[in-house]
Amino acid sequence: MKALTTMLVANRGEIAVRVMRTAKAMGMKTVAVYSEADANAQHVREADQSVCIGPAAVAESYLGIEAILDAAQRTGADCIHPGYGFLSENQVFASACEAHGIEFIGPPNGAIEVMGDKARAKRAMIEAGVPCVPGYQGDDQSLVTLVAEAKSVGLPVMVKAAAGGGGRGMRLVHEASELESAIGLAQSEAQNAFGSSELIIEKAVVRPRHVEIQVFADKAGNTVYLGERDCSIQRRHQKVVEESPCPVMTSQLREAMGTAAVEAAKAVGYVGAGTVEFLLDEAGEFYFLEMNTRLQVEHPVTEMVTGYDLVEWQIRVARGEDLPAEQADIDLFGHAIEVRLYAEDPSAGFLPSTGPIKLFATPEGEGVRIDSGVETGDEVTPFYDAMVAKLITYGETREDARLKMRSALRDTALFGPLNNRDFLLDVLDRPDFIHGAATTAFIDDNFGDAFLPPGVSSSDLAVAAATQHVLAMEHHHSQSASVNEELLDWVSMGRVTDTRRYDLGEQTYDVSLVPLSVGEYEVTVNDQTHHVRITDMGDSHVITEIDGLAHRYHYHDEAPATLYLSSDNLSMMLADSTRIPPEAQDAAGGGTITAPMHGQLLSIDVAAGEAVQKGQRIAVLEAMKMQHEIIAPGDGCVVEVAASAGKQIGAGDVIMMLELDE
Ligand code: MV4
């Protein structure tokens, strides 16, 4: 038995945070490593100690074996958890840890080595009696042999790079006439991508499900399986939704797949957490694909249905303890679903989206788990994977978990980078998903290469206008001495009409708002009129009653021109083109003079053609019973006067245009 007291986590983001929480709960000290881009990241904030291991680029930081081992030595870490990705399946790193007397929390490097090579893995699995897809995984890599083997396997075939994984370096071939060129291309691609041109050939399984078995082994050789996860819903080999149990699983099939997975693990002397991936075809036959020798992103769904903490198991196994449970004790209860929230732009082919996070709000509640590595105020940088959080929900039945996930996503807001929340909500409501019928063809069948979010509704825009109006009023209120709330929506000439113009893609919406009483408005969007009441407003949420129905929205205000608003199924960034931020005005030459707030123009002090000097008063606006002087921002000349004295004017409306001197 080993006493492990200090764990270094060689990772970042949600998995680093998640691993450290269990380590801490088990009484260990935690050490974070970080790149210069992550100096203030959440995993650093939560660690007991942290060490900078280099610049932002992963090759110079999170993949830097020496810097990480050095950090372990400097902080007295006696074990390293690699998380997933980065060095988690790197046998050089695993053996280097061992050589430094540091416990690598993962399998022995022999197991990493065998499973990292598809041909070797498959040969080992066939020997162990694990069902594999029929195919060729031999040493003779000549074109003639590969083509002949593919023909004898029978088309269609999958041609895969032996050193590839997770769908990289894989191609489907339908026609015998295409074999030669497809194999040639696959060889050169594999050589470039993985430094080895070795291929394997497999019969292509049509519309399979991706079903993976969680296995666990201790150092004494006890090996168990902890049910399965169905990860069929993937987009370009990126998992989107995962769940446990698999909707079409039976207890006989689970036992057969579980036993095969345990045999697979035993055949390579496995220790710790591992995942054996299978394809499950429409006839219920299953075939070994590959084994992932790490804790996977989607492990929480297994934790929810088994009740075990898999990181706790990893630590116990690393210490040399027996597995906490025997096969006969392991049961699955209920159903868990996980979705991956990504900072990406679904409408632009799911390209990553970066930048500061203005608001990240997630729900709390029974049966809802959020694993995330960022908070409001953090930044999504272009250097790393764009996953922001995992949402996991649990229910007694699959439908309970699905409904809980819908509601959790509706209560989630991510403002700043674009994200896939609305896409995930759409996925959850597709009939194939509702019926548990999704295969690996689900995304292609249901979506194209991009996801077009639902259209904005006039009631959402009415809420946006009311929210911005209230915020502007509060702002003025806090700036003026003491104004009775009742008077906020009034100026001396009478009731204010607040007008805005929202630009959303190609569409423009003209919105006008008339206050009826405090917090109650009549809002017209293009030609549709809504009755909006603001019933509650916090720093980032607003509850409104619109035409008699209550809704909760998240918002983030970037006065004067931008409002982020997220409703049940739509996240919007609303740019109000009538309220141009001062910086933008400067950039545009600074000659457009707009009203800083709504009110009445008391006077216009200059006329078209007249010269003005910087600091000169050019107009007077009365708002909130106060007079505001409008001052020329520079020397120049009046081109046009757009407003007239004595008239009401809305915030952002143009008063006059100046041509400023250079
Ligand atoms: C296959 C296959 C069909 N037949 N192999 C893709 C990821 C990698 N782990 C293996 N993959 C596949 N291998 C044979 N012989 C179909 C896939 C596949 C897939 C697998 C799991 C989840 C999503 C997928 C999407 C497309 C193809």
Image: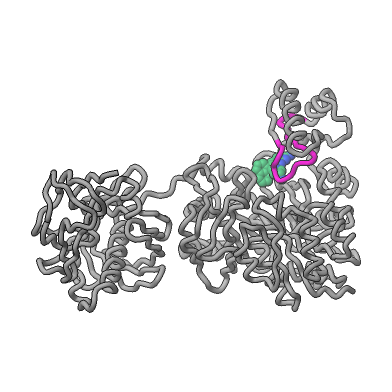
Along the viewing direction, whichever of 369 and 70 lies nearer the viewer: 70
Side of 514 relative to 549 (left or right) = left
Where is ligand 1, by quadrant? top right
Q: Nearer the viewer, residue 38 or 433?
A: 38
Which of the 4 image quarters holds residue 387? bottom right
The percent position of residue 458, horizontal first and vertical second, equals 29, 54
- The reply to whether residue 282 is in sight is no
Q: Position of residue 567 (x, y in %)?
A: 40, 60
Task: Report the residue at 58% width, 60% height from top.
Answer: 389
> Residue 74: x and y, percent?
79, 67
Quadrant occupied by the C terminus: top left
Question: What is the number of callouts on the image?
Answer: 0
Give yes or no for residue 161 being in the magenta stretch. yes
Asked if one can make out residue 41 in the rendered structure from this viewpoint, the answer is: yes
Quadrant holding the N terminus: bottom right
Q: Nearer the viewer, residue 555 or 127?
A: 555
Magenta region: 154-170
Q: Quadrant of residue 270?
A: bottom right
Vertical placement of residue 519 versus 83, above or below = below
Furthest-top residue in this view:
177
Task: Locate residue 499, reporting x and y percent.
Answer: 22, 56
Q: Main secondary structure of the magenta part?
A: strand
Q: Residue at x 68, y 71 (%)?
A: 47
Left of 420 or right of it: where is 580?
A: left
Is residue 553 rendered to the left or right of residue 384? Answer: left
Is 321 on the left or on the right of 393, as rendered? right
Q: Is residue 147 magenta?
A: no
